[in-house]
Amino acid sequence: MIKLLYITNKTFGPGGLERVLSIKASYLADHLDYEVHIVTLDQENEEMFYDFSSNIIHHDIVTSSNPIRFLRSYIKGLRKIVKEINPDVISVCDDGLKGFVVPILIGKPCPMIYERHVSKNIEIKSVKPSFKSRVFTNLKFRLMNFGGKRYDHFVVLTNGNLKEWNFKNLKVIPNPLSFYPEGQSTLNNKRVLAVGKQSYQKGYDRLLQSWKLVTQKYPDWTLDIYGTINAKEGLDKMAGDLKITEQVNFHEPVRNIADKYQEASVYVMSSRYEGFGMVLTEAMAYGVPCVSFDCPHGPSDIISDKTDGILIENNDITAFAEGIMFLIEDDETRKIMGNKARKAVKRYLPEEIIKEWNQLFVNLTHSN
């Protein structure tokens, strides 16, 4: 039995990292006889958004808002838990800066893996970052490079992500599918879907501009966007200015997001950058063809352009609208692409992806 410790932040949020961790950790605990432990930060009694196996052992570190006290309690808590568990492998799932320095903070009591769930581009917060912001981002990248090299393996999600790092310990393991349903969408509803929190990264400002062009020709179609609402993004106002408020709906995250995929006829991803784009694989599992910007990184790994979905040159807003309208107009092609998408995405089934993780863990424990 391999004793595996995941170090993360919180597991009660609706994000992709939390969803992926729930799938991987639960599969290893329930099907491959791993002893799985998860360490969280300040989670206390919060309920988890996704389902985690009851076989997983949960630990929580309570910290302080004071930076110095936070670091002290974090290090002390980690060291205590690691000593108690004595894991065979530690996997760090933390896209923040502290995740990169865990081997420095606690030493390396066993083989350690870092899982990078986002692109380096997440550090870019605006189209024209200030000089101060660019300097700070450069310093962060230096620290990331310093810490990342200290892991036995640095795992990224796509082939494109490999280009972001200059490490010898790099490995690609994509995210597993969250579900693969028996049924699929009929693709008959006049509904286009997008899923993800409102942020600069997700590019909903670009999506709304494209959707304006779509509504001029197809005003009876609706765009539903599910994800944490951020008033600072000003999307409500933008929809009003574009005069498309009747054709677009903003929703908070829902646990039954699978139902929303099944009700959609087209899925759209307008992200400026991604770590992977798990929403694409989820939509494809329901046989819903996707239109996505070919952003760094993920969509080009997942979608075969014009075969099981459509890739659009990044930031070409008009072409994005045209891609959506192509699928709206051509029922037969939409359904052919949807069926091919559903077949293609089987390569991301949990049993296939967890094989790769299991082999990595076994190799590390045997070589140690």
Image (cartoon, rainbow, N blue to C red):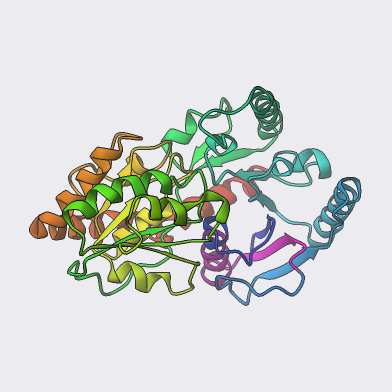
Magenta stretch encompasses residue 48: no
* In the image, residue 43 above or below residue 113: below
Instruction: Give the camera-side residue of 314 and 109.
Output: 314
Q: Count all numbered tags in the image, as a single digit.
A: 0
Give the x, y percent position of residue 78. Answer: 82, 54
Give the x, y percent position of residue 339. Answer: 18, 60
Identify the residue at image location x=66%, y=34%. 148
Instruction: Give the camera-side residue of 48 and 199.
Output: 199
Looking at the image, can residue 355 be seen?
no
Identify the residue at image location x=65%, y=50%. 91
Which residue range is magenta in the image? Answer: 20-43
Give the x, y percent position of residue 253. Answer: 50, 67
Magenta stretch encompasses residue 28: yes
Looking at the image, can residue 187 be seen?
yes
Quadrant into which the N terminus falls: bottom right
* In the image, residue 159 above or below residue 61: above
Identify the residue at image location x=73%, y=60%. 39
Quadrant into which the C terminus falls: top right
Instruction: Give the camera-side residue of 219 and 143.
Output: 219
Is 362 on the left or on the right of 328, as rendered? Answer: right
* In the image, residue 292 above or below residue 164: below
Is 78 on the left or on the right of 308, as rendered? Answer: right
Give the x, y percent position of residue 40. Answer: 72, 61
Is 79 on the left or on the right of 197, as rendered? Answer: right
Identify the residue at image location x=21%, y=60%. 219
* In the image, residue 18 above or below residue 145: below
